[in-house]
Amino acid sequence: MEDPTKQENKISILSEFWDFLKTRKKWWLGPIVFLLLMMGLLIVMTEGSAVAPFIYTLF
């Protein structure tokens, strides 16, 4: 079973980041973080596939 405090920590990090963006008016950070997460997810998902050599040439 998953520890409920871990789930609360994940939600807490997201809510703190959202509050930071609203308070400091750093809206330009949102798309940057989103793109970094998507690129990381792409690398992790294609790690063991035949597409991996083509993905790594992009970076």
Image (cartoon, rainbow, N blue to C red):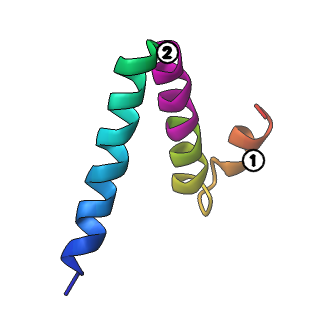
In the picture, measured across the screen, residue 40 lies left or right of residue 24, that is right
Q: Amino acid at mark 1?
A: Pro
Residue 28 falls inside the magenta stretch: yes
Residue at image point 56% right, 23% down: 32
- Local crowd size for mark 1, using a 10 Å CA cut-off: few (<14), some (14–19), many (≥20): few
Q: Nearer the viewer, residue 39 or 50?
A: 39
In the picture, measured across the screen, residue 53 lies left or right of residue 44, that is right
- Local crowd size for mark 2, using a 10 Å CA cut-off: few (<14), some (14–19), many (≥20): few
Rendered image: mark on residue 53: 1
Whole-angstrom CA distance, mark 1 to mark 2, is 36 Å
Rendered image: mark on residue 26: 2
Residue at image point 48% right, 20% down: 31
x and y percentages locating residue 57 in the rendered image: 80, 36
Q: Secondary structure at mark 2?
A: loop
The magenta segment is 26-37
Q: Quadrant of residue 5?
A: bottom left
Above or below: residue 22 compared with residue 1: above
Name the outermost residue toward the bottom.
1
